[in-house]
Amino acid sequence: MIKTDVVIIGAGPVGLFAVQQLGLIGLKAEVIDNLDKIGGQCIELYPDKPIYDIPALPMCTGESLTQNLLEQIKPFKTNFDLSQRVEKISRENNNWQIITSKKNIFLTPNIIIAAGVGSFEPRKFSVQGIEKFENSGVFYSIKNKTFFKNKKISIFGGGDSALDWAIELSKIANITLVHRRNEFRGAEHSEAIVRKLDKEGKIKIKTPFQLKSVEGKDKITSITIENEDGKAEKINTDCLLGFFGLIMKLGPIAEWGLNLDKKTIPVNTETFQTNKEGIFAIGDICTYPGKLKLILSGFHEGALAARACFKLARPNEKYRFEFTTTSKTLQERLGIKKSD
Ligand SMILES: Cc1cc2nc3c(=O)[nH]c(=O)nc-3n(C[C@H](O)[C@H](O)[C@H](O)COP(=O)(O)OP(=O)(O)OC[C@H]3O[C@@H](n4cnc5c(N)ncnc54)[C@H](O)[C@@H]3O)c2cc1C
């Protein structure tokens, strides 16, 4: 069990800046995210796109903003618990107990929900009976590519992930790339490579086809694909990879007894506390009159929520407002000045 002053759900830009605000006032945070990487929407949806409205940064990208936020919280040596969704929250005396999909347990007086628009989850195949093969023969991401060595793999999708993995795995496996349209959506350069590999017989491209059925008892032996005219083809296959993009789901947050307004959590704007004591919501997931779904608003919300967390994490101490410019204590926490 991990005990900490604050658990932050969501490693998006707002969760990251909250770590800094908590660290400055001497509180330790643990950050949990469903994704396998840090950065939330900035990294998952627009890593290369320019952002022009972060205060004092005339231009940054989703990726450089994330890197800068990580640099800013380096002194606090924060633990990130990635690739796991927070599933359950329950009250344990004066603390909250959090359980994740990896069955990790956290105990904390404060939870900051910085979960954006919910957890990103892969869009899945809709063919009947396919769920039973998930993680043994059907995958929506690749953790370890050596698992696929020498296998017969059917990759579905027309975007960058499908093209990039088709190219990469063609070096170690037998690849069929299936897409429902003749045109791919991914980078032109990647499409050119895939088409070249197809000509050289190193990849088979099947378009415009969709998955119709999966055959096999305990493991997949073949699949059937079909085009718009009803023409079907059977393909011997060990594994299916689906790259259809991500959907965002509020997920288990809806079951934690919090007041909800559509898919957002109403908060008190003095503390950003929800209807439950010790549970705060900041960033895109929270709502209040005048809420702007901008990163800069989330930074402000995190600063106020952090001060409110202090009261529950340090009930016998008094919070003192200080500036980083002049406070020796804050500068020590930032690793700027050593103690006398
Ligand atoms: C294309 C695009 C361009 C944009 N451009 C701008 C811009 O120029 N300026 C601007 O200010 N804003 C912009 N935005 C909006 C901005 O990205 C969001 O306001 C910001 O990402 C919100 O940050 P967040 O930390 O609240 O949530 P997110 O970035 O959504 O991060 C939330 C994280 O929580 C995780 N999570 C959710 N539920 C759980 C759970 N149960 N367990 C574990 N983890 C969970 C998710 O996996 C995710 O990583 C843009 C958005 C998009 C899509």
Image (tube, rainbow, N blue to C red):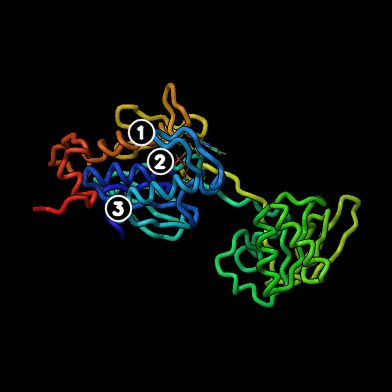
Left or right of residue 142, residue 313 in this image:
left
Q: Specify few, some or many for label 2: CA neighbours under 10 Å numbering under 14, 14-19, or 20 or more.
A: many
Q: CA distance from mark 3 to mark 2?
A: 22 Å
Q: Position of residue 72 (x, y in %)?
A: 33, 48
Q: Position of residue 219 (x, y in %)?
A: 69, 71
Q: Left or right: 295 with respect to 149?
A: left
For the residues carrying marks 3 and 2, which lies nearer the camera in this image?
A: 2
Mark 3 Cα within 10 Å, few/some/many (few <14, many 20+)? many
In space, the residues marked 3 and 1 are separated at their CA atoms by 23 Å
Question: Left or right of 72: which side holds 188?
Answer: right
The residue drawn where x is 44% and y is 26% is 291
Determine the residue located farthest toward the top in the rendered image: 289
The numbered dot on residue 14 is 2
Q: CA distance from mark 1 to mark 2?
A: 8 Å
Using the image as rendered, state which of residue 318 and residue 134 is in the foreground: 318
Pointers 1 and 2 in contact (CB under 8 A)? yes
Where is mark 3, residue-wise? 107
Give the secondary structure at mark 2.
Answer: helix
Q: Quadrant of the N terminus?
A: bottom left
Q: Earlier in the sequence, mark 1 or mark 2?
A: 2
Mark 2 residue's CB less than 8 Å from ligand 1? yes
Looking at mark 3, is its residue's CB closer than 8 Å to ligand 1? no
Q: Are marks 3 and 1 in contact (CB under 8 Å)?
A: no
At label 2, the amino acid type is Val
- From where the camera sits, is residue 128 visible? no
Name the kind of residue labelled 3 in the image: Leu
Which one is in front in this view, the residue at disc 3 or the one at disc 1?
1
Residue at image point 46% right, 47% down: 64
Residue 231: image location, x then y, percent: 90, 57
Q: Which mark is residue 301?
A: 1
Q: Secondary structure at mark 3?
A: strand
